[in-house]
Amino acid sequence: MLVIPAIDIIDGKVVRLTQGDYDKKTIYCDDPVSVAQKFKNMGAKRIHIIDLDGAKTGEPINLPIVKEIVNSTELDVELGGGIRNIQTIAQILDCGVKKVILGTAIYKDENFAKMSIDNFGEAVIFGIDAKEEKIKIEGWVKESGVEIFDCLKIFENMEVKTILYTDIAKDGMLSGPNIEMIKKILSKTSLKVIAAGGVTTIEDVRKLSKLEQKGLVGAVVGKGFYEGNIDLKEVFRAF
Protein backbone atom coordinates (compact mmCIF):
# COMPACT_ATOMS: atom_id res chain seq x y z
CA MET A 1 0.00 0.00 0.00
CA LEU A 2 1.32 3.41 -0.99
CA VAL A 3 1.39 6.13 1.63
CA ILE A 4 0.89 9.35 -0.32
CA PRO A 5 1.64 12.72 1.31
CA ALA A 6 -0.61 15.57 0.25
CA ILE A 7 0.01 19.11 -0.92
CA ASP A 8 -3.09 21.28 -1.24
CA ILE A 9 -2.50 24.61 -2.97
CA ILE A 10 -4.32 27.93 -2.74
CA ASP A 11 -2.77 31.14 -4.09
CA GLY A 12 0.52 29.29 -4.57
CA LYS A 13 0.70 28.32 -0.89
CA VAL A 14 0.51 24.97 0.90
CA VAL A 15 -2.70 24.89 2.92
CA ARG A 16 -5.06 22.52 4.66
CA LEU A 17 -8.81 22.97 4.95
CA THR A 18 -11.07 21.57 7.64
CA GLN A 19 -13.79 19.35 6.16
CA GLY A 20 -13.25 21.05 2.80
CA ASP A 21 -14.31 24.46 4.11
CA TYR A 22 -12.44 27.25 2.29
CA ASP A 23 -13.18 29.57 5.22
CA LYS A 24 -11.32 27.21 7.57
CA LYS A 25 -7.92 27.41 5.93
CA THR A 26 -4.50 27.03 7.55
CA ILE A 27 -1.40 28.09 5.60
CA TYR A 28 1.63 25.90 6.30
CA CYS A 29 4.19 27.05 3.73
CA ASP A 30 4.64 29.60 0.95
CA ASP A 31 6.68 27.19 -1.18
CA PRO A 32 4.99 23.94 -2.32
CA VAL A 33 8.13 22.88 -4.21
CA SER A 34 10.20 22.84 -1.01
CA VAL A 35 7.53 20.74 0.70
CA ALA A 36 7.61 18.26 -2.19
CA GLN A 37 11.40 18.08 -1.90
CA LYS A 38 11.02 17.34 1.81
CA PHE A 39 8.63 14.48 1.03
CA LYS A 40 11.13 13.07 -1.47
CA ASN A 41 13.93 13.20 1.09
CA MET A 42 11.72 11.39 3.60
CA GLY A 43 11.20 8.54 1.13
CA ALA A 44 7.92 9.27 -0.63
CA LYS A 45 7.25 7.58 -3.96
CA ARG A 46 4.15 9.57 -4.94
CA ILE A 47 2.68 12.96 -4.01
CA HIS A 48 -1.01 13.82 -3.95
CA ILE A 49 -1.59 17.41 -5.10
CA ILE A 50 -4.94 19.20 -5.12
CA ASP A 51 -5.29 22.57 -6.85
CA LEU A 52 -7.96 24.03 -4.59
CA ASP A 53 -8.13 27.20 -6.68
CA GLY A 54 -8.83 25.01 -9.66
CA ALA A 55 -11.47 23.00 -7.82
CA LYS A 56 -13.38 26.21 -7.21
CA THR A 57 -12.90 27.90 -10.59
CA GLY A 58 -13.23 24.85 -12.84
CA GLU A 59 -9.77 25.02 -14.42
CA PRO A 60 -6.28 24.32 -13.05
CA ILE A 61 -4.66 27.48 -11.69
CA ASN A 62 -1.45 26.19 -10.12
CA LEU A 63 -0.17 23.97 -12.95
CA PRO A 64 3.19 25.84 -13.25
CA ILE A 65 3.92 24.95 -9.62
CA VAL A 66 2.93 21.34 -10.22
CA LYS A 67 5.21 21.16 -13.24
CA GLU A 68 8.10 22.51 -11.15
CA ILE A 69 7.43 19.85 -8.51
CA VAL A 70 7.46 17.12 -11.16
CA ASN A 71 10.71 18.36 -12.69
CA SER A 72 12.54 19.03 -9.43
CA THR A 73 11.59 15.87 -7.52
CA GLU A 74 11.05 13.28 -10.28
CA LEU A 75 8.40 11.74 -8.02
CA ASP A 76 5.13 10.35 -9.31
CA VAL A 77 2.45 13.01 -8.94
CA GLU A 78 -1.31 12.59 -8.86
CA LEU A 79 -3.19 15.84 -9.43
CA GLY A 80 -6.80 16.91 -8.96
CA GLY A 81 -8.78 20.12 -8.94
CA GLY A 82 -10.62 21.80 -11.81
CA ILE A 83 -9.88 19.17 -14.45
CA ARG A 84 -13.04 19.17 -16.53
CA ASN A 85 -12.18 18.46 -20.16
CA ILE A 86 -10.09 16.07 -22.25
CA GLN A 87 -7.69 18.78 -23.38
CA THR A 88 -6.80 19.66 -19.80
CA ILE A 89 -6.10 16.01 -18.95
CA ALA A 90 -3.73 15.79 -21.92
CA GLN A 91 -2.02 19.04 -20.94
CA ILE A 92 -1.46 17.83 -17.38
CA LEU A 93 -0.10 14.45 -18.43
CA ASP A 94 2.22 16.20 -20.90
CA CYS A 95 3.68 18.06 -17.88
CA GLY A 96 4.83 14.74 -16.44
CA VAL A 97 2.00 14.16 -13.97
CA LYS A 98 1.34 10.40 -13.72
CA LYS A 99 -2.25 10.32 -12.49
CA VAL A 100 -5.12 12.76 -13.00
CA ILE A 101 -7.94 12.82 -10.44
CA LEU A 102 -11.37 13.68 -11.83
CA GLY A 103 -14.34 14.75 -9.76
CA THR A 104 -17.01 17.31 -10.62
CA ALA A 105 -17.04 16.75 -14.40
CA ILE A 106 -17.57 12.98 -14.25
CA TYR A 107 -20.80 13.52 -12.30
CA LYS A 108 -22.06 16.24 -14.62
CA ASP A 109 -21.10 14.71 -17.96
CA GLU A 110 -21.17 10.93 -18.41
CA ASN A 111 -19.75 11.25 -21.93
CA PHE A 112 -16.69 13.06 -20.58
CA ALA A 113 -16.25 10.37 -17.93
CA LYS A 114 -16.28 7.63 -20.59
CA MET A 115 -13.97 9.56 -22.93
CA SER A 116 -11.44 10.14 -20.15
CA ILE A 117 -11.13 6.39 -19.59
CA ASP A 118 -11.16 5.56 -23.30
CA ASN A 119 -8.37 8.06 -23.99
CA PHE A 120 -6.18 7.81 -20.88
CA GLY A 121 -6.98 4.52 -19.17
CA GLU A 122 -5.16 3.92 -15.88
CA ALA A 123 -3.76 7.45 -15.86
CA VAL A 124 -7.20 8.60 -14.70
CA ILE A 125 -8.49 8.23 -11.13
CA PHE A 126 -12.16 8.89 -10.37
CA GLY A 127 -12.68 10.84 -7.16
CA ILE A 128 -15.47 10.11 -4.71
CA ASP A 129 -15.63 13.01 -2.26
CA ALA A 130 -18.41 12.15 0.14
CA LYS A 131 -20.14 13.18 3.33
CA GLU A 132 -22.65 10.70 4.80
CA GLU A 133 -22.53 8.66 1.57
CA LYS A 134 -23.52 11.67 -0.58
CA ILE A 135 -20.98 12.82 -3.15
CA LYS A 136 -20.06 16.50 -3.27
CA ILE A 137 -18.64 18.47 -6.20
CA GLU A 138 -17.14 21.84 -7.16
CA GLY A 139 -14.63 22.01 -4.35
CA TRP A 140 -17.00 20.12 -2.03
CA VAL A 141 -19.40 23.07 -1.89
CA LYS A 142 -22.30 21.55 -3.87
CA GLU A 143 -24.33 18.34 -3.75
CA SER A 144 -23.95 16.09 -6.79
CA GLY A 145 -27.23 14.28 -6.20
CA VAL A 146 -25.31 10.97 -6.37
CA GLU A 147 -24.62 8.49 -3.58
CA ILE A 148 -21.42 6.45 -3.26
CA PHE A 149 -22.80 2.97 -3.86
CA ASP A 150 -24.91 4.02 -6.83
CA CYS A 151 -21.84 5.01 -8.82
CA LEU A 152 -19.45 2.13 -8.05
CA LYS A 153 -21.05 -0.28 -10.54
CA ILE A 154 -21.26 2.48 -13.15
CA PHE A 155 -17.53 3.11 -12.77
CA GLU A 156 -16.79 -0.60 -13.08
CA ASN A 157 -18.80 -0.77 -16.31
CA MET A 158 -16.77 2.16 -17.65
CA GLU A 159 -13.63 0.13 -16.89
CA VAL A 160 -12.33 2.64 -14.37
CA LYS A 161 -9.36 1.08 -12.55
CA THR A 162 -8.89 3.24 -9.45
CA ILE A 163 -11.04 5.47 -7.27
CA LEU A 164 -9.99 7.98 -4.62
CA TYR A 165 -12.42 7.96 -1.71
CA THR A 166 -12.25 11.06 0.50
CA ASP A 167 -14.37 11.22 3.63
CA ILE A 168 -15.15 14.94 3.91
CA ALA A 169 -16.33 14.66 7.52
CA LYS A 170 -12.94 13.21 8.49
CA ASP A 171 -10.79 15.48 6.33
CA GLY A 172 -8.63 17.79 8.43
CA MET A 173 -10.17 16.64 11.71
CA LEU A 174 -7.19 14.54 12.92
CA SER A 175 -9.65 11.91 14.17
CA GLY A 176 -8.62 8.86 12.16
CA PRO A 177 -10.01 7.50 8.88
CA ASN A 178 -13.50 6.10 8.43
CA ILE A 179 -12.37 2.48 8.47
CA GLU A 180 -15.89 1.03 8.41
CA MET A 181 -16.90 2.99 5.32
CA ILE A 182 -13.66 2.08 3.56
CA LYS A 183 -14.34 -1.59 4.33
CA LYS A 184 -17.87 -1.24 3.01
CA ILE A 185 -16.67 0.32 -0.24
CA LEU A 186 -14.05 -2.39 -0.69
CA SER A 187 -16.72 -5.06 -0.15
CA LYS A 188 -18.95 -3.53 -2.84
CA THR A 189 -16.42 -3.05 -5.65
CA SER A 190 -13.55 -4.67 -7.49
CA LEU A 191 -12.00 -1.27 -8.16
CA LYS A 192 -8.68 -0.31 -6.61
CA VAL A 193 -9.24 2.21 -3.81
CA ILE A 194 -7.10 5.03 -2.43
CA ALA A 195 -8.39 6.39 0.89
CA ALA A 196 -8.13 9.98 2.13
CA GLY A 197 -9.46 11.88 5.10
CA GLY A 198 -8.44 11.64 8.74
CA VAL A 199 -5.19 9.63 8.44
CA THR A 200 -3.38 11.04 11.46
CA THR A 201 -1.04 8.50 13.06
CA ILE A 202 1.12 5.54 12.10
CA GLU A 203 -1.49 3.35 13.81
CA ASP A 204 -4.07 4.66 11.31
CA VAL A 205 -1.74 3.58 8.51
CA ARG A 206 -1.34 0.15 10.10
CA LYS A 207 -5.11 -0.31 10.23
CA LEU A 208 -5.46 0.70 6.60
CA SER A 209 -2.60 -1.53 5.47
CA LYS A 210 -4.59 -4.54 6.70
CA LEU A 211 -7.12 -3.75 3.98
CA GLU A 212 -4.56 -4.04 1.18
CA GLN A 213 -5.62 -7.57 0.29
CA LYS A 214 -9.20 -6.32 -0.11
CA GLY A 215 -8.15 -3.75 -2.73
CA LEU A 216 -6.87 -0.72 -0.81
CA VAL A 217 -3.83 0.45 -2.77
CA GLY A 218 -3.05 3.78 -1.12
CA ALA A 219 -3.64 6.16 1.78
CA VAL A 220 -3.29 9.94 1.59
CA VAL A 221 -1.69 11.74 4.55
CA GLY A 222 -2.29 15.47 4.90
CA LYS A 223 -2.93 17.47 8.05
CA GLY A 224 -1.60 14.68 10.26
CA PHE A 225 1.85 15.42 8.86
CA TYR A 226 1.58 19.20 8.89
CA GLU A 227 0.47 19.21 12.53
CA GLY A 228 3.30 16.89 13.57
CA ASN A 229 1.14 13.89 14.47
CA ILE A 230 2.83 11.43 12.13
CA ASP A 231 6.49 10.77 11.31
CA LEU A 232 6.53 10.08 7.57
CA LYS A 233 10.12 8.79 7.64
CA GLU A 234 8.97 6.10 10.06
CA VAL A 235 5.89 5.41 7.95
CA PHE A 236 7.87 5.02 4.73
CA ARG A 237 10.34 2.70 6.45
CA ALA A 238 7.49 0.56 7.77
CA PHE A 239 5.26 0.50 4.70
Image: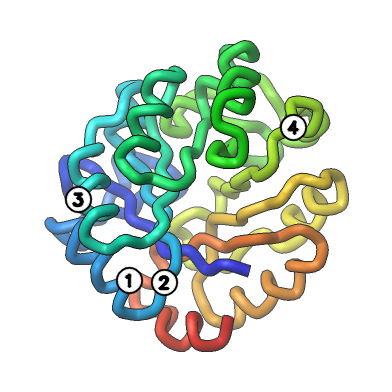
Counting residues from the start of the chain, the first of labels 1 and 2 encountered is: 1
Amino acid type of the residue that numbered disc 4 sits on in the rendered structure: Glu
Tell me, for residue 159, which label it has, or none: 4
Tell me, for residue 44, which label it has, or none: 2
Q: Element under label 2?
A: loop
Left or right: 192 with respect to 173?
Answer: right
Q: CA distance from mark 4 to mark 1?
A: 32 Å
Left or right: 22 with respect to 174?
Answer: left
Residue 144 seen in render: no
Q: Element under label 4?
A: loop
Q: Element under label 1?
A: helix
Residue 150: percent from left, percent from top? 79, 28
Residue 234: percent from left, percent from top? 46, 88
Q: CA distance from mark 4 to mark 2?
A: 28 Å
Residue 56: percent from left, percent from top? 34, 27
Q: Check the picture and name the quadrant holding the N terminus.
A: bottom right
Amino acid type of the residue that numbered disc 1 sits on in the rendered structure: Phe
Q: CA distance from mark 1 to mark 2?
A: 6 Å
Front-most of residues 205 and 37: 37
Amino acid type of the residue that numbered disc 3 sits on in the rendered structure: Glu
**Residue located at (61% from left, 56% from top):** 195
Counting residues from the start of the chain, the first of labels 4 and 2 encountered is: 2
